[in-house]
Every structure is written in structure tokens, then in C-alpha cells.
Image: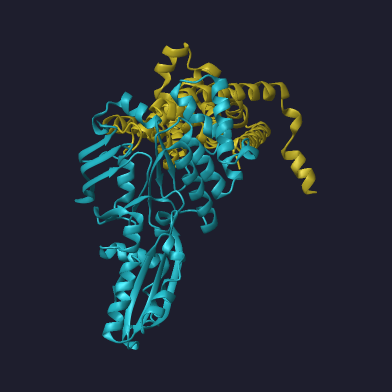
Amino acid sequence: MIRIEHLHKTYRLANRDVTALNDITLEIESGEVFGVIGRSGAGKSTLIRTLNLLERPSSGGIFIDGEDITRFDSAALHKLRQRIGMIFQHFNLLNTKTVAANIDWPLKITGKYTRRQRAQRVTELVDLVGLSAQRDSYPAQLSGGQKQRVGIARALANYPHLLLCDEATSALDPETTQAILRLLLDINRKLGLTIVLITHEMQVIRTICDRVAVIDDARIVETGKVADVFLHPQHAVTRKLVAESHSFDNDSALQPHQFRGKLVRLTFVGEITYQPILTHVTAATQALITILQGTISRIKDTPYGQLLVELNGSDDDIRRVFAHFDQYRIHHEVLS
Amino acid sequence: MSLTIATNVIDLSVINWDDIMQATLETLTMTGVSLLFTVLIGLPLGILLFVTARRQLLAQRGVYLVLSLLVNVLRSVPFLILLIVMIPVTLLLVGTSLGVEGSIPPLVIGTAPFFARLVENVLREIDRGVLEACQAMGAKTHQIIFGALLPEALPGLLAAITITAITLMSYAAMSGVIGGGGLGDLAIRYGYQRFQTEVMIVTVAVLVVLVQLLQFFGDRLVLHFTRQ
């Protein structure tokens, strides 16, 4: 649905050129939630802003439904933007307009609807985001989460096929973040809308994205399904981002030299997460397994678990343990 | 004792209150009419300055520089000089350079560039992100200006209009120097040229009251349109 090909963007700052995007090539499928993660300054904000040409790329193509939007004239660009919703970190609502008027504004812009049609659509939208009671309030009277709900309703007004989220939850507290992410996921499923979001938080990616691209220093360093990237990160930057999100390997109490046996990280994905695998394995072998650290959680709808264990036993025992893990399709990685 | 001295110095009985009334109305007319034209000229000029500036909606370096220079030149001419320089133009426009009519053209030319700069500054204070959100929705530039930028800037614009109205009132008084009419004219003819200090004091007092009233109602309007 969206194909980004060899996208470059260079800014001229003072007397030097700064590269914000360096040869970005990506494909985003219809109906998926696609995340871009990176540190601030990595270029993720520039990337999402090129998708509706708020930012003009220096070279390269952006194909939406087969058409290169970088070649659109201004009339076509206005039409395209009316069909692409966007929400922002700081909400960017009109402070002098009520909730209802903020949501009505993008409908008014198109000039396509009668007053009655617009009023009906606004009512649908305030219901969808759960703000019926606040429809006549001004943004200054709302909480951060409510403001972002208005932002979402406004972005959805013209039945977009694509929703861009520019750090949409970064200004919200963790609880509100979860509520907004649930709403986005709900909308993605109900309306079949494609969502592209950028964030610096792995937690956001893990909660709602299907696929993720990791951007560092203006380049995409890793792309894949969230479970693959999150559980088996390849690039150093990805590893760091993942590690920060669950502080798994950072514990200084777990220095490898303190252990006599083998330090192994086990990763379970899917229903097997809930099976008593370790019990089966210890019953079938003579090996001793000590659990040092562990977590069981979800990546979007998929349960997963990660355990850091110490294995003690003869080489033969340990080989048999690994054979069992392979049989149960448990990914194992020997750390020492 | 001091009270008797004061009453001896300020003898309000010499004042012709009809003259004061007449002059007050003239001052209000001068201020009101020139405020109207100042806004009509200065608001579009200020909007143009804002949208043509660097990295704005219609960034046009050449246009911005020319407008900016024009505004700066007009603003650097002292108002008293402008009053005199403008006389031929005023004669051409309204047929006289005297009285209420004669003072309006120089007042407008003197304050419109000032008001345009105020407008530009008010518009710059509007969150860029809000305008960007409108662009992202597919709004055209005129829709952004009239549907988002100006409504968002309304409280600031009202504050700018209040400041401009007060500036106009003091400039209007100054136009008394070239026979402009109103309280300034009265103060100069009676208070200065005929040594009637009482007239001077009363005109200043009336001006103080008028300025207070303008500021009060201006502030009330700003508050009314600020959605907090």
C-alpha cells in the first residue's frame, strides 16, 4: 500500500548539510500497524512527515496505492491529505474552538458535506472516542488523554485510509498511554485503517504494532515482525532499545562469572508460554535448572516469555536439555 | 491653607465645558475613524508580513523584505514630522489638512505600520503545530489563515487593537499642533497659547479617563475571547 523507495532528505543548517533520511526503503501493508522506533534525532519524525509531504524529501519516491505522491500538484496534494489522518505529540488542537468544532473543521475544509451531514459525523466521532459529554468543552478544559482523543476523532473525520501518529503518546502518562493505544488498536481493527506510528518507546511498539522498523542515524537498521525484532534483536541499537524496555540484561547482580553452570536465555512464543516445560525437561534429564530472572508478557496478542536460567549438569545432560528445548520450539541462547 | 492656594491656581469656573465636550467628541471621532482604517490597512499588512516570512505558509523572501522595509521606514519617521510631511497628501485625500478630517490620514499612515508589526508578532505567537495540523488535514492556505490562524489569534489581536487605539488617541492629541482638532487642539490653543492652565489640566484629565476606559474594555474583550 505504501512503498518508500530510496528516500533521502538533507537539510541545510547554518553552513553544513545535515542528513535526516539516508536511503530509506520500506513497504507498509494495507491494514497493518507499522511502527518506526528510534532515538530523538534519528530521523523518525522527518520520515513520518514525508508521508503526507509536510516534509519534502530531497530525492526518492513515496508510492501510496501505486502513485508517487512526491509528483502530486497542490490540488492533488490537498485531496490526498484530506484522506490521511495525523495525530501529534502535543495534540495541536485549535484552542478557540470547542471539541465539536475541532472535529468539524476537517469536514468543513473539504466543502463536500452539508451542515447536517457534518453534525451527524461529529456526533459519531465523539461517541467513537468516548467524549460525548465534552463535546462543547474547549481544549483548555480537557486532560491530555482527552485532548489526544479529540486529535484522533479529528484525524478520522474524513474517513482516512491511513493514520499517521507522530509520538502520539509521548506527552501522556503510562496509564493514559495504554488507553490511547487500545483506542488506536480498536480503530485499526474496526475500520481496517493502516496506522504508521513513530515513537522512542519499545513499549508502544510492543503493545500495538505488527511490524517495526528501527531507525538510527538516518538509516533503517532493522525491519521485521515485532515479535522477531523484540525477542531476537540483531542490531546493537535495537538491542539497547529492547533492553531498556524491560531492563532484562542490565542487572549488575547477574554477572556471568558468578555462575558455575551455563547461563542460558530461553524465549517462548505463543501458547507454549503457559506450559510447564521446565518441569518436563528436568524430569527427563539429570540437569539442574535455576531460574535467575524471568518475564511473561504479550507482544500485541501473542503471549511470550523470557527466562534467564543457569544449567548445571554433565555435557550429556545439557545436550539432552537443549534437544528438549528444540523439540518444544523454545529458542535458547547460551550467554556463557 | 494649601487648599485655598490650590483653588486660587485652578479656577474651574474659567472653563467652557461645551468646548471640552465638543473636543472630547472630536478626539473620539478621530480615534475611532483612524482606528478603523488602521485595522483595515494594518491587519492585511501584518498577515502578509507573517505569511511571507521565512519558513511560513507562503514564504516569499522578496515580498517580505520590501514590506518590512516599508513598515520600518514609516515607523522611523517621528509622528510630528509625518504630520507635516503628509499635508499635501491629506489635502488631496480629504480636501483639508485641518480639523478632524485633516488629521485622520496622517494618523492612519502613522499607526498602520505599527499595528501591522503588532499583528505580525501576535501571529508568530500562534503554535506552529496547530497550523501544521491544518496543513496535514489538507486545508488550503486561505482556509488556514481565516479558519485557524485569525480565530486562534483573536485575543492577541484584540489586545493589539487596544494598544493601537491608545496610541492613536495620544497621536490624535498631538495633531492639535497643526490644527487637528480635538482635546489636543484645545489644550494647545487655550492651555498653551492663552496660558489657561486649567484647560490644559482638564484636557489631560479627560485623556487619562479615556485611556483608562479603552484599556479596561480592551482587557475585558481579550478575556472574553480567551478560551481557558
Indicate left or right for A309 with A121 as reference.
Answer: left
Residue lying at 27% horizontally and 38% vertically, measured from the top left = A56
Relative image position of residue A181 (x, y in whole percent)? 48, 50
Instruction: Say whether residue A93 is visible.
Output: no
Instruction: Say whether residue B152 is visible.
Output: yes
Residue lying at 27% horizontally and 43% vertically, measured from the top left = A27
Residue lying at 36% horizontally and 64% vertically, measured from the top left = A242
* Camera-side residue of B167 and B220: B220
Relative image position of residue A48 (x, y in whole percent)? 33, 44
Relative image position of residue B37 (x, y in whole percent)? 49, 22
**Which quarter of the figure has residue A60?**
top left
**Which quarter of the figure has residue A248?**
bottom left
Residue B154's place in the image compared with A273, above or below, is above
Quadrant placement of the C terminus of chain B: top right
Chain in cyan on the image: A
Relative image position of residue A38 (x, y in whole percent)? 33, 56
Instruction: State how many labels appear.
Output: 0
Chain in yellow on the image: B
In the rendered view, how is the structure colored? by chain
Residue A91's place in the image compared with A254, above or below, is above
* Camera-side residue of A40 and A276: A276
Which residue is farthest front?
A284
**Which quarter of the figure has residue B60?**
top left
